[in-house]
């Protein structure tokens, strides 16, 4: 069967609620290196651009010592990798939607600014990896979101059509990626961003994935 459509997804805050495990890793590092720990709801102001940026946003003053940066980043990644699926769960309706999309022969890919190996490991542990033709992380290509090539290269790799593709994400980084690639964008409300839905350009707005098939059917 020929693929009729392609859907690209961000990962954290879009199809999986990873906030509890990201914040656990963040606070582990903060405690070890003598910095202030954060609350779970602080994920909105911290996540979205990788481990170091997440930690850097916690400091009142910028840390410029490269060795300390590397130590803290390594500690974060090591801890997070060991606890990646402890409390992370798919968003409501995600699994049902992925099964529906597969039944319609819709191809799907992941475009995340999480490291590729971590993204794949998380998806495998949540039994979600099987749904995606390709997973592109922050280190898969020499560029990442909001560079449109993060999206367009994945579309090309999985044999999709740029004119028959939509992007789903939860932040302005995802929105800008989609806009830069000339793709329609679906915004998942209350994601890992401080911006409101009114501040993020989007074509569709969803709270979760229950009934999302009806949204996608409009584009098929």
Image (cartoon, rainbow, N blue to C red):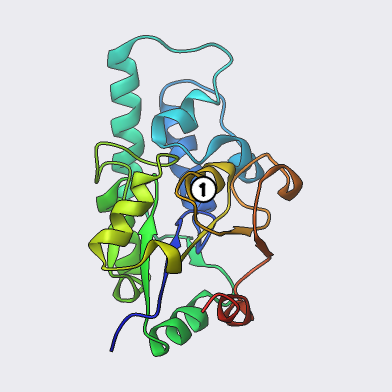
Residue 35 or 107: which is nearer the viewer? 107
Image: 90 above or below 199: below
Residue 38 or 62: which is nearer the viewer? 62
- Which residue appears farthest toward the right when viewing the image? 198
Point out residue 167 in the picture as x, y percentages from the top left corner: 49, 59
Q: Is there any visible trace of residue 136 in the rendered image?
A: no
Q: Is there any visible trace of residue 76 in the rendered image?
A: yes
Q: How many numbered dots are placed on residues in this image? A: 1
Point out residue 123 in the picture as x, y percentages from the top left corner: 34, 65
* Element assignment for label 1: helix
Point out residue 177 in the picture as x, y percentages from the top left corner: 48, 45
Residue found at x 50% / y 41%: 48
Residue 176 or 97: which is nearer the viewer? 176
| Residue 128 picture quarter | bottom left
The image quadrant where one finds the N terminus is: bottom left
Image: 94 above or below 45: below
Residue 47 or 67: which is nearer the viewer? 47
- In the visual, does 204 lie left or right of 74? right
Point out residue 137 in the picture as x, y percentages from the top left corner: 31, 49
Residue designated by label 1:
174
| Residue 4 picture quarter | bottom left
Dot 1 crowding, Cα within 10 Å, few <14, some 14–19, many 20+: many
Residue found at x 46% / y 51%: 21
Image: 212 above or below 11: below
């Amino acid at each position: 069967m020929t693929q009729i459509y392609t859907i690209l997804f961000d990962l954290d805050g879009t199809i999986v609620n990873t906030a509890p495990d990201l914040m656990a890793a963040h606070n582990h590092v903060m405690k070890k290196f003598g910095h202030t720990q954060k609350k779970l709801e602080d994920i909105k102001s911290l996540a979205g651009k990788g481990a170091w940026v997440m930690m850097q946003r916690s400091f009142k003053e910028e840390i410029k010592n490269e060795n300390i940066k590397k130590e803290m980043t390594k500690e974060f990644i090591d801890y997070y990798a060991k606890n990646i699926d402890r409390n992370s769960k798919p968003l409501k309706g995600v699994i049902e939607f992925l099964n529906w999309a597969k039944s319609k022969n819709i191809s799907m890919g992941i475009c995340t600014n999480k490291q590729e190996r971590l993204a794949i490991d998380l998806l495998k542990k949540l039994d979600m990896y099987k749904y995606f033709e390709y997973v592109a992380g922050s280190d898969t290509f020499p560029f990442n979101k909001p560079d449109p090539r993060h999206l367009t290269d994945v579309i090309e790799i999985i044999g999709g059509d740029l004119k028959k593709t939509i992007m789903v994400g939860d932040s302005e980084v995802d929105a800008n990626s989609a806009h830069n690639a000339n793709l329609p964008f679906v915004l998942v409300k209350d994601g890992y961003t401080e911006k409101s839905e009114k501040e993020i350009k989007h074509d569709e707005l969803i709270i979760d994935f229950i009934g999302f098939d009806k949204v996608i059917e409009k584009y098929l």
